[in-house]
Image (cartoon, rainbow, N blue to C red):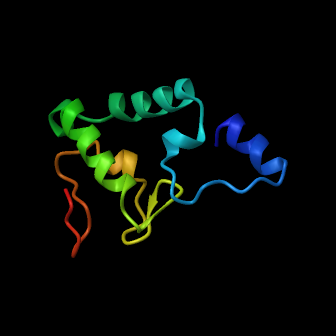
């Protein structure tokens, strides 16, 4: 968990349950986390940057997202959206 999130929780602040992880941490922390995950994956499995942005845009408007987690399947959407072999769970299949 990022220091910004930990500090907010320590102050008793509620975090937005509809936000993606990138909205809860600093841009630098978010970029480091996603980069680490992306670098660990086989490059053949990765979607393009534009497809990744499109998928996240669809997730941001979804009523099933809470704190960056899909409540239909339990995944962290920002990790799942990286992979070509992963999709939005049925019956939604938005991407």
Q: In the rendered view, does 56 fall on the left or right side of 12?
A: left
Is 9 drawn above or below residue 46 in the view shown? Answer: below
Q: Position of residue 48 (x, y in %)?
A: 18, 32
The image position of residue 41, as x and y in percent, is 29, 35
**Location of residue 27 in the rendering, given as x and y in whole percent from the top left corner:** 53, 27
Tell me the quadrant of the picture where the C terminus can be found.
bottom left
User: Which residue sits furthest bottom?
Assistant: 91
Looking at the image, how many numbered discs can be counted on the residues?
A: 0
In x, y percent, where is residue 11? Answer: 84, 48
Can you tell which quarter of the image residue 53 is in? top left
Q: Is residue 55 left or right of residue 44?
A: right
Horizontal relation, residue 60 to residue 49: left or right: right
Q: Nearer the viewer, residue 68 or 76?
A: 68
Q: Residue at x 51, y 32 (%)?
A: 30
**Residue depicted at x 44% and y 69%:** 71
Q: Residue 66 or 44: which is nearer the viewer?
A: 66
Where on the picture, by quarter, is residue 8? Answer: top right
Q: Nearer the viewer, residue 27 or 2?
A: 27
Q: Is residue 77 above or below residue 66?
A: above
Nearer-the-camera pick, 60 or 30 = 60
Give the residue drawn at x 71%, y 35%: 3
Vertical order, 65 against 39 (above or below): below
* Image-based side of 46 in relation to 57, left or right: left
Quarter placement of the N terminus: top right
Q: Residue furthest toward the front?
A: 61
Q: Is residue 26 above or below residue 77?
A: above
Give the residue at x 40% y 28%: 35
């Amino acid at each position: 968990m990022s220091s910004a999130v930990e500090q907010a929780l320590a102050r008793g602040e509620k975090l937005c349950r509809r936000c993606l992880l990138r909205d809860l941490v600093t841009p630098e922390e978010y970029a480091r986390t996603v980069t680490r995950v992306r670098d660990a994956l086989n490059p053949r499995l990765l979607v393009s940057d534009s497809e990744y942005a499109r998928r996240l845009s669809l997730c941001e408007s979804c009523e099933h997202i809470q704190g960056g987690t899909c409540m239909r399947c339990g995944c962290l959407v920002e990790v799942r959206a990286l992979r070509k072999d992963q999709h939005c769970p049925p019956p939604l299949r938005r991407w």
